[in-house]
């Protein structure tokens, strides 16, 4: 019999506090991913703790320890082995009695979703490694990049929003999958579709509980709009208003360069030496420098001490759009047509448009959704497996969601997305082609070896 129980460790500044076994009344962990980063799901955990002291009492001094975004680590003990399930940040908490408290927490993606991002513009290509360093390093977010993606180049505009939005734009344009499950940092790894992956794991029938199988509608047309930016010689007025004294932030609706601001907040300072002499030009004009404004391609911050007219002008980057279109073969009936349009991915351009369209095509060909329950397993989200279904048919699937009961035996409700693989029968004179993966010994060996394709 498998023995399991959760361990939840609060990382207080004064030291760690750990709860496990009967101290954790119940705990449910939801892990999710998206293969091609059309979105970045947030992993969450909800749990109840039973305490025998007033550590978490709302009316004690110790209540100050509980703060929003307090980090905590979650583990599961499985037959003596401790498995890291992830790092989370406290979201909400409440007393349900003097001994029981309920907690909710989310992963680092949830933190990024609640953190404002001012936007960026890359007029020339930057590598994925450089882009992530520019976005995530200033806010002290730890991450790891798959070496095969580090040199992928990106360019274009990221509008203001949240840091989750920014990471999604980067991941989608780089052909990456963003993962936080079973780790303390963010992993940016290459997007891999089960369409082109040869499995090295098999579900045995005994590991599957009651299951359902759904067939998604066929996607007949995919349109991906690319955004190619060119500098304009025209000067535009970005902002022009009379403002009272105070602090302001202006967000632009599109990127600009050579931005000029005039108004009462722009204070000119005359440059001078330590001895008190002013610096002048050969004509006797004082050298001046301005301050009080913080300007970038997407936004401006400024503080004005007196009321006045503030005007911001700049040269826009003109977005020249182009559509990349894929039409699925065999979708002639108008009644069966479904169209997907991606128009707001502003890091897509003529350099990566076709590659990302191919990834969208492969993703929307994954039409089989299988849900089932698993006993304690080493499988994780984004793993690709060959799974049993009804009618003695297997599907090649990527695990997209795991809803785990950490106090109820570490059972998982799993949602998987994939295809029915096409087996190629042996020919008279087969020519073997190298494929990734391993042959699995035991029952079903002959069928498994059909994964090796023959000419």
Image: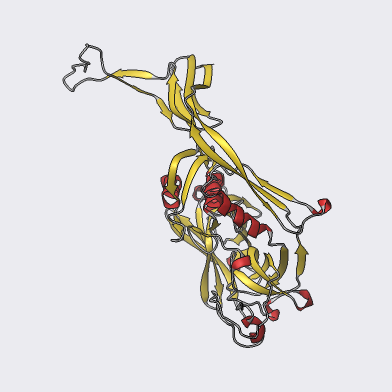
**So how many labels did they put on this image?**
0
Quadrant housing the C terminus: bottom right
In the image, farthest residue toward the left? 275
Residue 216 image point, x, y percent: 75, 59
In the image, farthest residue toward the top? 284
Picture quadrant of residue 420: bottom right
Quadrant housing the N terminus: bottom right
Q: Nearer the viewer, residue 69 or 394?
A: 394
Q: Nearer the viewer, residue 97 or 424?
A: 424
Q: Nearer the viewer, residue 371 or 148?
A: 148
Q: In the visual, does 395 lie left or right of 268?
A: right
* Colour mode of the rendering: secondary structure
Q: Is residue 102 visible?
A: no
Q: Residue at x 62, y 72 (%)?
A: 385
Picture quadrant of residue 21: bottom right
Residue 227 image point, x, y percent: 56, 40
């Amino acid at each position: 019999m498998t023995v399991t129980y959760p361990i939840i460790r609060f990382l207080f500044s004064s030291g760690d506090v750990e709860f496990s076994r009967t101290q954790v009344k119940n705990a449910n962990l939801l892990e999710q991913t998206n293969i091609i980063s059309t979105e970045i799901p947030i992993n969450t955990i909800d749990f109840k703790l039973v305490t025998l002291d007033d550590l978490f009492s709302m009316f004690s001094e110790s209540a100050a320890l509980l703060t929003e975004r307090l980090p905590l680590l979650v583990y599961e003990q499985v037959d003596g082995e401790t498995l890291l399930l992830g790092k989370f940040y406290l979201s909400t908490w409440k007393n349900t009695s003097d001994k029981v408290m309920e907690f909710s927490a989310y992963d680092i993606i949830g933190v990024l979703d609640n953190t404002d991002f001012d936007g960026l513009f890359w007029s020339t290509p930057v590598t994925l490694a450089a882009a992530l360093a520019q976005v995530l390093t200033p806010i002290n977010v730890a991450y790891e990049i798959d070496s095969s993606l580090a040199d992928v180049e990106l360019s274009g505009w990221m509008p203001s929003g949240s840091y989750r939005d920014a990471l999604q734009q980067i991941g989608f344009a780089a052909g990456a999958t963003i993962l936080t499950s079973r780790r303390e940092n963010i992993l940016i790894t290459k997007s891999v579709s089960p369409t082109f992956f040869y499995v090295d794991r098999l579900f045995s029938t005994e590991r599957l509980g009651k299951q359902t199988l759904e067939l998604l509608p066929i996607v007949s047309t995919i349109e991906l709009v690319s955004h190619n930016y060119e500098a304009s010689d025209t000067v535009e007025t970005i902002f022009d208003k009379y403002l009272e004294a105070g602090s302001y932030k202006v967000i632009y609706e599109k990127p600009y360069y050579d931005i000029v601001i005039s108004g009462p907040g722009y204070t000119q300072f005359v440059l001078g030496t330590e001895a008190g002499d002013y610096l002048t030009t050969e004509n006797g004009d004082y050298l001046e420098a301005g301050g009080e404004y913080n300007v970038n391609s997407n936004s401006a911050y400024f503080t004005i001490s007196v009321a006045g007219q503030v005007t911001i002008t700049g040269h826009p980057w003109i977005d020249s759009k182009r559509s990349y279109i894929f039409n699925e073969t065999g979708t002639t009936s108008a009644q069966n047509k479904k169209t997907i349009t991606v128009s707001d991915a502003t890091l897509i351009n003529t350099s990566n448009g076709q590659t990302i369209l191919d990834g969208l095509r492969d993703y929307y060909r994954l039409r089989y959704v299988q849900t089932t329950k698993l006993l304690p397993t080493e499988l994780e989200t984004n793993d690709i497996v060959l799974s049993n279904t009804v009618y003695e048919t297997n599907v090649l699937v990527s695990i997209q969601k795991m809803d785990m009961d950490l106090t109820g035996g570490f059972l998982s409700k799993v949602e998987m997305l994939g295809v029915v693989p096409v087996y190629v029968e042996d020919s008279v004179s087969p020519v073997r082609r190298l494929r990734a993966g391993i042959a699995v010994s035991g029952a079903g060996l002959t069928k498994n070896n059909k994964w090796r394709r023959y000419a």
